[in-house]
Amino acid sequence: MSDSMAPLPYAGVRVVEFSHMVMGPTCGLLLGDLGAEVIKVEPVGGDSTRRLLGSGAGFFPAFNRNKKSIVLDLKTPEGLAAALALADSADIVTENYKPGTMKKLGLDYAALKARNPRLIYVSHKGFLPGPYEQRTALDEVVQMMGGLAYMTGRPGDPLRAGTSVNDIMGGMFGAIGAMAALRQRELTGEGCEVQSALFENNIFLVAQHMMQFATTGQAADPMPNRISSWGIYDVFTVQGGEQIFLAAVSDKQWAVFCEALGLGELFADPRLASNNDRVRARDWLMPLLRAHVAPRSVAELSAIFEAHELPFAPIAKPQDLFEDPHLKASGGMAPVRMNDGSFSPIPLLPLALDGARPGIRLQPPLTGEHTRELLLAAGYSAEAVEALIASGRAQAQ
C-alpha cells in the first residue's frame, strides 16, 4: 500500500499469537495483513514449521508474514511472566494448542480475562465443545469424518482435498470471529472468547450436499461420479495430452459453444434443445465432443473460449502459478522471505481495499527477531532483557 492511502482497517490492534502449523497462523496472517500488530510467541528453538520438509516445507513463509517474533520458554516462571505482560497489552490473543494446554500454562481465557477484561481470545481447535472435543484432529481426520473426502474421491476411494482446506478456513473463521468480537467490544466494552474448529468448518463446507439430500431424498454422489447439473461441464484431454476444463451452463452458452466450435448439427439436434436434455444425453454427447476437441491445443481452445466469453480453464499445477500473467500483472503476489533467506513470490490476500491489495509490511520473522524490542516495550530494563536471554528463558537474534 502507498503511504498516501488510508490506514489499514486493523492498524493499532495488537494480537498475541500462541500458535503453530497452519490454522492458528492463518488467523494471525489475516489480521496482520489487514494492519494488526501480530506478535508470534515461539518456543525456544523456534516454531517447528520452520524446519518441516516435504509438503510442510512452505508452511512458515506462507502463514507468518506481517508478524513479529518473540521466543519465550513458557514452562519457566520468567518466560510465563513475559507472556502475561504481552497478553495484558493485547486486544486479541490467539492459540491453537491441544485442549487443556493453555490452561496448564495459566494462559487460558479465564486467566487472561481476569487480568484484561477487554481481551478477545480466539481458540482454534479440532472440535467445538461436545462429545468429540478431546479428540486429536487433523485436516485429514475431519475431512474423512465430515464427508469431504467421500465427496472428493471416487466411489470406495475417499480422498483428502489437495490443500489444507480446513486448517486455512478454520483460521479464516477464527479471524472473522475476532473481527465480530472487536465490533461487539465497541458496543459493550467487554471482550469475549471466540472458538473456531476444524470439524465444524468442514461440516459448513459440505452443508450444500447435506441440503441436497434434505431437499431431494437422494444422497450426493462423490464428485468424480456425480451427475452434473450442467450438460457441458468437464475436463477434456486435447493435443499433446494436455487438459482443459470447458463448460456451457446455459442454453445461450450452448448456442455460442456450438457456433465457436463449428457444431451446428448438434445445436440443431432437438434431443439437445435444453440443458436438462443435454444432461440426459451426456452418455452419447460427451464422446462426440471429446473427439471433436481432441486435435486442438489448449492454447487454441483457450483463445476461442475467451473470445466467445465461455467458461474455460487450462489445468494448472501449483508451480505454474508463479508465471500466471494475471497474478503477475494484477499485483496478486509479492516477494516473501523463505526459511533459507531467499525470496519467492507469494499470493497475497484475495481481496482489494479501494483497489489495493494489502501487502507485506514485515517479512516472516527470524526466530526471536523482535524479542528485545518487545520486552523493552513491555517495561523490562535492558539488563533484565539480557538476563532473560542469557538464562535461556528467552531467545533473540
Image (cartoon, helix red, strand yellow):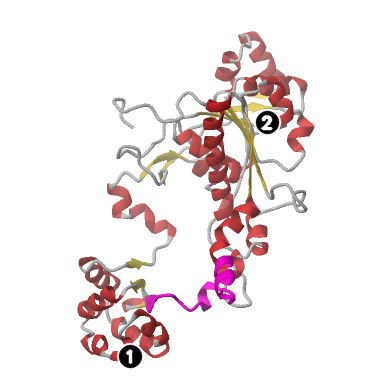
Relative to 182, residue 384 above or below: above
Q: Residues within 10 Å of mark 1 (few under 14, many from 20)?
A: few
Pick the front one: 127 or 330: 127
Q: Is residue 129 left or right of residue 370?
A: right
Q: Secondary structure at mark 2?
A: loop
Q: Is residue 256 left or right of residue 105?
A: left
Residue 302 appears at what percent x and percent y? 27, 68
Which residue is disc 1 drawn over?
271
Relative to 300, residue 385 above or below: above
Which residue is disc 2 drawn over?
44
Is residue 331 one of those drawn in magenta?
no
Pick the front one: 88 or 206: 206
Is residue 230 one of those drawn in magenta?
yes
Looking at the figure, which quarter contains the N terminus? Answer: top left
Q: Nearer the viewer, mark 1 or mark 2?
A: 1
Pick the front one: 368 or 148: 148
Q: Secondary structure at mark 1?
A: helix
Residue 89 appears at what percent x and percent y? 60, 20
User: Residue placed at 55% from the left, 23% from the top?
Assistant: 370
Q: Amino acid at mark 1?
A: Arg
Nearer-N-terminus badge (1/2): 2
Q: Is residue 164 visible?
A: no
Which segment did they paint magenta?
A: 210-236
| Alpha carbon distance from label 1 to label 2 | 69 Å
Marks 1,2: beta carbons within 8 A: no
Q: Amino acid at mark 2?
A: Val
